[in-house]
Image: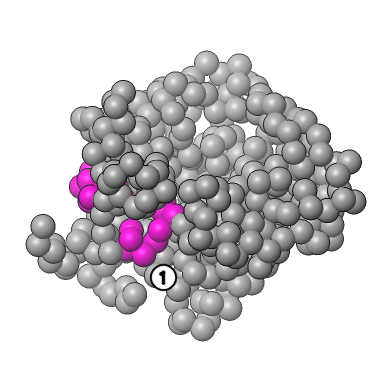
Amino acid sequence: MTQGGAARRTVLGAAVLAAGGAVAGLAPGTAAASEADRGDRGDHGHRDLPVPTVIGHRGASGYRPEHTIGSYQLALDLGADVVEQDLVPTRDGHLVCRHENEIGGTTDVADHPGFAARRTTKSIDGVSVTGWFTEDFTLAELKTLRAKERIPAVRQRNTLYDGRWAVPTFEEVLRWADREGKRRGRRVWLHAETKHPSYFRSLGLGLEEPLAKLLRRYGRDGRNAAIFLQSFEPSSVQRLSRLVSAPRVVLLSAANTRPWDFELAKDPRTVADLVKPEGLKWIAGFAQGIGPTMDLILPRDASGRLGAPTTLVADAHARGLLLHPYTVRNENSFLPAEYRKGTDPAAYGDAFGAFRTYFEQGIDGIFTDNPDTGLLAAEDFRPGRRPVNR
């Protein structure tokens, strides 16, 4: 898809510039952004992205097993503006792309008798998880495994591709993005998440330093780098802000939850506190955006239908923060009740209706497993476009 000048959103640059005045009131012990960082926020290279931005969630995971080169490639081929990776480490410190460090559900590790003894139970961010974990494998061992579809009951067609791709390292993804960028004549944007950073740091496998090293090696560490760095743990985003200048996003889960690093630090704040004006002001001191669950923008009622919107979009924009909420999928089981069609949870519902309602809230981008659907829906909301008849 061609991304012409009409598809740029100049309002975003102004909103990001406004963040310069939103760094006062940081929590004690929090590192504030430097004067240069505050003054140059408007120079982050967001402007070559159309708005609303369509982010391929784990690639094009609606059509291929997630976090594979095949999924990333398809997302890009479908026209996704940004392609997402989740990062976890191997035992020997390599960053690999998996949604979780438990890989029983996303690889064929259970079919390898030599790894049977490594099945174990661990506490990950306070939750007991049983399976196989990336931190118990060297990269060479992990490369003997093949990726598979994580939710075959919903996406049976994706199982056709089970075993086709290995688990990619993040360095392989960076090389892939560079190759594709040269071939296409434009930058390939990424959206990389540090998963369970406090847990891994406790094992001596901190994520931020090796990530920053790779970003510097591949020229994605500056303010104009074609990458967003994200985490559900604000302290990880703060740590990254001291290592690189690339754009950063704080992910936000349900309102009644508390980031795991807050739990460890005995910080009483919940996500509900972080989405209030003071919480957003604090986030704006070290990040350029937030990635809230869509329910923080449009809550669902007990029947699963969308309720009245909150003020989060306006409040975040007032503090210079962009919003990349998550996640829209085509299947009924993931859609709000009013957009479901029929009773088959794996059947497609009215995803276009859901996208339209979300874009009408004024969000800057959205994560989706189906980037082609998201792009068609986004066209009606990009500057210079004439809405289709409805």
Query: Which element is circle 1 on?
Result: helix
Q: Quadrant of residue 118?
A: top right
Left or right of residue 58: residue 91: right
Q: Look at the image and tell me whether residue 150 can be seen.
A: yes
User: Residue lying furthest left in this view?
Assistant: 389
Left or right of residue 115: residue 57: left
Residue pictured at 33% horizontal, 58% vertical: 374
Residue pictured at 46% horizontal, 81% vertical: 184
- Is residue 338 depicted above or below 348 in this figure? above
Residue assigned mark 1: 78
Left or right of residue 192: residue 130: right
Residue 59 sits inside the magenta stretch: no
Identify residue type, mark 1.
Answer: Leu
Q: Which residues are magenta?
A: 353-375
Residue pictured at 48% horizontal, 40% vertical: 250
Counting from the top left corner in percent of width and height, residue 211 is at 67, 53
Residue pictured at 37% horizontal, 29% vertical: 275
In front: 95, or 206? Answer: 95
Left or right of residue 217: residue 43: left
Counting from the top left corner in percent of width and height, residue 69 is at 60, 67
Q: Look at the image and tell me whether residue 311 can be seen.
A: no
